[in-house]
Image (spheres, helix red, strand yellow):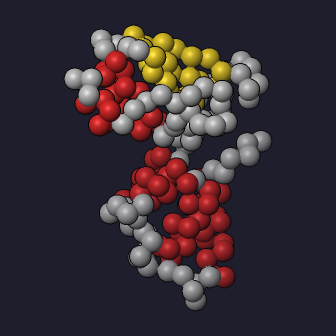
Amino acid sequence: MSSEPTYNDFHLRVDKTFDSVKDTQRFGQYYFNCLDSLRPDLANKIRGSKLDPFFKDEIPAETMKFVAENWEEVPVGEHKGDIRGTEVDKNTVIIWFNSPDGDSSDSQHFELRCASHAQAVKIANRYNRIFNVTLGADTPYQHLVQSPEEVATYS
């Protein structure tokens, strides 16, 4: 049995427990807070957007559709085979993955050769934004991707 909550689990939680807070929270606020506690990655995708229900008494149909369609996306960095981060070495982007066949301390990497150091930095930064990852203190690798200002000096 999976320990990750399903979309159904989320809706059951919202429906069954809202009555206990309805005097202090709007329905949209409670819906968003439940979403943030179970799937912060999805909450962050709608936070501050037209889909954000926080200040509403009802949940817009577009919000419910977005959450339902994106629920099965598994947050990155937590499972075997997920991208862990990137690093740049000269004109190469090194993309690190959690090992699909080892324990939590194992990793594998892929090296992507680029035309220049600046291009490698731009690609690494794009992957980090798309997958919301960096190599942090919990990994033995140093995150070398530079700021856009530093990249501009290579042009």
Residue 12: give x, y in percent of width and height.
64, 64
Residue 23, above or below 128: below
Q: Can you say which quadrant of the picture contains the N terminus? A: top right
Residue 65: give x, y in percent of width and height.
42, 55
Viewer-proximal residue among 43 and 14:
43
Viewer-proximal residue among 89 and 97:
89
Residue 122: give x, y in percent of width and height.
33, 28
**Quarter of image, res 153:** top left
Q: Residue at x 39, y 32 (%)?
A: 146
Residue 56, above or below 70: below
Q: Can you say which quadrant of the picture contains the C terminus? A: top left
Q: Residue at x 74, y 29 (%)?
A: 104
Farthest residue to the bottom: give it. Answer: 23
**Quarter of image, res 88:** top left
**Quarter of image, res 102:** top right
Q: Residue at x 48, y 12 (%)?
A: 111
Q: Residue at x 66, y 72 (%)?
A: 16
